Amino acid sequence: MGLTYKDSGVDVEAGQKQVSLIKDMVKKTHRPGVLSNIGGFAGLFQLDTEEYKEPVLVSGTDGVGTKLKIAFMMDKHNTIGEDCVAMCVNDILCQGAKPLFFLDYIATGELLPEKMASVVEGVSNGCIKGKCSLIGGETAEMPGIYNKNEYDMAGFCVGVVEKENIIDGSKIQSGDRLIGLPSTGIHSNGYSLVRKIIFERKEMNIDDYVEELGCTIGEELLKPTRIYSNPLIGLNKKFKIKGIAHITGGGFHENIPRMLPEGLMGEINIKNIKTPVIFDLLQKWGNIEEEEMYKTFNMGVGMVLAVSEGDYEEILEYLDQLDEEYMQLGIVKEGKSGIKLCQE
């Protein structure tokens, strides 16, 4: 009897089963503009050219890094896709874009339809929160490259912004104010250090209950990355936001300067930051210097907005009306590019 593709470790029928399991999840994300259904060779999306005089497409791609290891350890896969959407959507929101559509790519050693459907469930939920449509993707079965029980994933998001409304930080000036929007925890960055602290230095198990957190360490580490479409789309319509920084890898020190013109720095009052307990524990368990924490983690701040002094109070009132939490982080000043942490 001759060899088949399945004999080499690739199960085409499993792929077909996965498609049937995720069809309804994908359809839930669809919005006006989607012209294609799952199963085609490419996703189709029609841009509303009447809404924009000079539409500019904004794109972003990312993955979730070694946070995947936590999903493997817990054998829980229905939230990691939400992280992937968040990392892409949040990046394009920084340019003032309104998310339109998302595609995902998952590669695995063995295609288990139910597990992959669970991953796509998270992607679908993320797209709903991000206000974008899941219009396509790829699941690749790659035996010999990935272990049977592991997978990797990445995503790609496209949004649109009116050319004159692009947010690029170029209009930021000394005296502008900085506003922080809270994170839901670690989000999807710094997990190599997190795992070293928790599983090597502390020798904890993934299901150890931590009283200070009110949950197991695994549950805390797997909390999905917050998606900021809700507050930011509304803010960008109503106000001229000058700059937005997504606090990801590199923490405050790397990401806030990315939106600041040369010759300007951000002065951050860390006393106004509501830092989640997990960061206090990581700092204590790992004996990490405070400066290093702010160079690695979001410390409870997922997005930083730069706004003019004249709009500042009105923006805070608007956030209050939305019941959105925020932090009055500090001010933009003249100085060497970077940030200065202070405790005023």
Image (tube, rainbow, N blue to C red):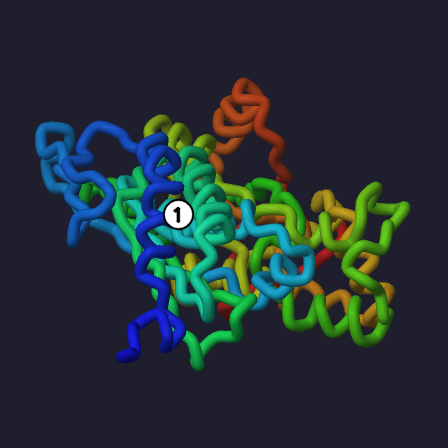
Percent x, y of residue 302: 56, 48
> Residue 185 or 257: which is nearer the viewer?
185
Percent x, y of residue 94: 39, 49
Assign a secondary structure to mark 1. Answer: helix
Asked whether residue 232 appears in the rendered view, the answer is: no
> Residue at the location (69% across, 71% down)?
193
Up the image or down, 1 lies above or below 49; here it is: below
Q: Specify the amino acid type for callout 1.
A: Val
> Residue at the location (22% across, 47% down)?
39
Asked whether residue 15 appears in the rendered view, the answer is: yes
Instruction: State which quarter of the image contains the N terminus.
Output: bottom left
- Left or right of 50: which side holds 319? right
- What is the tally of numbered marks visible in this picture? 1
Up the image or down, 150 lies above or below 223; here it is: below
- Left or right of 61: which side holds 299? right
Look at mark 1 in the image and give the residue it sits on.
89
Percent x, y of residue 257: 48, 63
> Residue 248 or 77: which is nearer the viewer?
77
- Left or right of 340: which side holds 342? right
Percent x, y of residue 243: 41, 48
Q: Single out the residue that lies furthest toward the front.
A: 1
Q: Residues within 10 Å of mark 1 (few under 14, many from 20)?
A: many
Up the image or down, 181 lies above or below 61; here it is: above
Give the quadrant of residue 324. top right
> Residue 204 or 279: which is nearer the viewer?
204
Q: Single out the residue that lies furthest toward the right.
A: 211
> Residue at the location (34% across, 42% down)?
20
Q: Single out the residue that lies furthest toward the top.
A: 321
> Residue at the location (57% across, 58% down)?
188
